Image (cartoon, grey):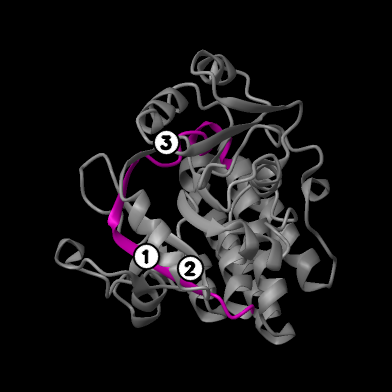
Amino acid sequence: MARVAIVIVTYNSGSEIGGCLDALASVADLEIVVVDNASMDGTRDQVAQRGVGLIANAYNAGFAGAVNQGVLATSAPMILLLNPDAHYVSGLEQLIEVFNDPSAGAAGGVLTGPDGLPQAGFMARNLPSATALILEVLGVHRLWPGNPVNWHYRCKGISQLTAISSPIPVEQPAGAFLMFPRAAWRQVGGFDERFWPIWFEDVDFCARLKLAGRRVWLVPTAFANHKGAHSIDTLPSSARQRFWYGSLLEYAAKFYTPLEFRVVCFAVFAGSALRALGGLPRHGWSIWSVFGPVCSLAISRFLGKKSGGPEIFNGLNGASGSNGDA
């Protein structure tokens, strides 16, 4: 039995999946499966050319659903979740060593961007507080990135990684390069498929690991090169906004108090309305097609409507065209 199963979720990833799989070709003792969410490009051909296991979904199962499919289709005790645009470089052994501690629930590595620099603020974060998400949706983090809430949320204190060799405790490494034991995945019930199709499913997974008493780490000696958002950029702006805010509200509903959740809903409504007003001079009333549905979603969640899964986005063009590699 292989020690590690690599699970890669794809959607229209033909330009990236070949390089991702080629980077793994020389690594021994791996079980690799690609779960494809109904790609319409050459993704599946690229996988077939390399003789790698493929689950070819006829529909978009969402990122969380596809991850669960991949885990169930493999048998190795350790799972490495890897985005198709995250090309493995080194450090697999160091990731595995973290789990000599039976309390370890997940470990991420360093993601470097096209510029060769660590993707600080993305590759590891603390779990978002209600305040962090409120400031996020109101645009405060963008206008004042150095504020203490954002500094804590995005782990801005992690610096000089080249001088560190030991794992660093964090709360949420990026799902683009994330290892976890199959036992931990089972313990928390897998990835929550209500986060459809993308965003916050890895945050939710790490939050539930923490609640289960598991520890999460960043391994500064494990590396992958990460392009980022190669499929997301193909979605219409309206789809991106609704998916992101929908998943954000789903996370807030799960982990915050009722009062905190309603404040987050109000902040989503206010922030989206302000963005729509700000976009009027450039885009005209068409901007409302982007932010109006988000305002409606925030109101419905504020009033107590339950959501989760693709049904809340029925009728949205492009809803089947996404994956989890944000």
Does dot 1 land on a helix, a strand or a loop? strand
Look at mark 2 in the image and give the residue it sits on: 136
Residue at the far left: name it: 163
Position of residue 209 relative to residue 49, above or below, is below
Circle nearer the N terminus (3, 1): 3
Is 220 covered by the magenta stretch? yes
Look at mark 3 in the image and give the residue it sits on: 85
Residue 289: tell me if it is visible. no
Label 1, residues with CA under 10 Å away: few <14, some 14-19, many ≥20: many
Circle nearer the N terminus (2, 3): 3
Residue 208: tell me if it is visible. yes
Does dot 2 land on a helix, a strand or a loop? helix
Residue 323: numbered disc: none
Q: CA distance from mark 2 to mark 3?
A: 26 Å
Report the residue at 77% width, 45% height from top. 313
Is residue 62 left or right of 226 when viewed as pictured? right
Mark toward the viewer: 3 or 1: 1
Quarter assignment of residue 10? top right
Residue 192 in percent (x, y) is at 71, 58
